Image: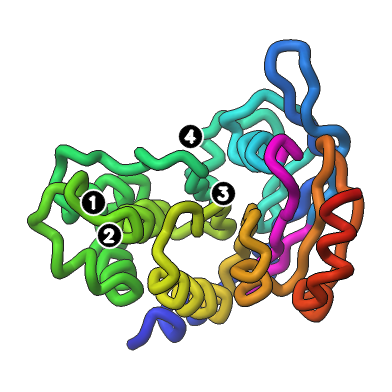
Amino acid sequence: MTIVETLSKSRNDHAAVICRGLTARYNRIAVVHGVDLDVHAGEMLAVLGANGAGKSSLFGAIAGVVAGGGEVCVGGHHLGRMSAHTRASNGIAFVPERRGNIFPTMPVAENVDVGLRLLPSGERGAQRDLIYELFPILKERGSAMAGVLSGGEQQMLAIGMALGRKPKLLILDEPSQGLAPAVFDILEDVFDRLKKSGLALLLAEQNVPFAARIADRYVVLSYGQIRSKGGKEDLRNSEELAEALMR
């Protein structure tokens, strides 16, 4: 059974993500102001914007690693003031922008197993197989130390570890940053298969051509607020999108 067939079988059609009035702050400084987002099961929403627009802070607030307010609802469950760890247990998986989301001095296979630790033991074998189906290179390099992997392989490992939680929402902050173009094709295929499985994906990107390949909708964030939004066809209209990003 393929990953699409396996995950689709257990798909929760109500596993959409609803965010209302999201804020994010560092100490007393507010950096995200009242953002509303909906992400449906089986789609990818891209959050675009320049450096400093608030993308990472917004994602951190949703994942619970950045202080903030507002309402986050995943799969019909309101997360309220849950901690980041509890949010992870309730369906949110976050792959931050920074590298270092892996354990470089541990073998690749052990890293994958760390990502599975939130699952009941009886579910881990099947989920491990699904991760290796998505990223065969991780199985091939299972005994290698994670720190010797290429940048693209390390990003695949970080995403694989996040998928080990069987999330309802996968948050990806600048996943293409610093990667070789050949890796884009692999990630595009993986994200397409995950969408077909019913997973909701939230993406931050400055690489607009890459976002246009994989996202279904987009919003433009500027100074912590949504300034514009559009669909897949709009993503391919470089002139209009460039204008929106400069607003």
User: Type of residue at label 4?
Assistant: His
Disc 3: which residue: 173
Disc 4: which residue: 85
Of residues 200 and 12, the one nearer the viewer is 200
Q: Nearer the viewer, mark 1 or mark 2?
A: 1
Residue 124's disc number: 2
Give the alpha-carbon distance from disc 1 to disc 3, as whole Å.
Answer: 22 Å
Q: Earlier in the sequence, mark 4 or mark 2?
A: 4
Are the residues at dot 1 and dot 2 in contact (C-beta closer than 8 Å)?
A: yes
User: Type of residue at label 3?
Assistant: Asp
Q: Residue at x 15, y 42 (%)?
A: 106
SS at mark 3 in the image: strand
SS at mark 2 in the image: helix
SS at mark 1 in the image: helix
Q: Is residue 79 visible?
A: no
Q: Is residue 207 visible?
A: yes
Magenta range is 38-54
Q: Earlier in the sequence, mark 1 or mark 3?
A: 1
Q: Check residue 79 for magenta coloring.
A: no
Of residues 160 and 223, the one nearer the viewer is 223
Disc 1: which residue: 113
Count of labels in the image? 4
Residue farthest to the top, as pictured: 28
Q: Nearer the viewer, mark 3 or mark 4?
A: 3
SS at mark 4 in the image: helix
Q: Nearer the viewer, mark 1 or mark 3?
A: 3
Rendered-image quadrant of the N terminus: bottom left
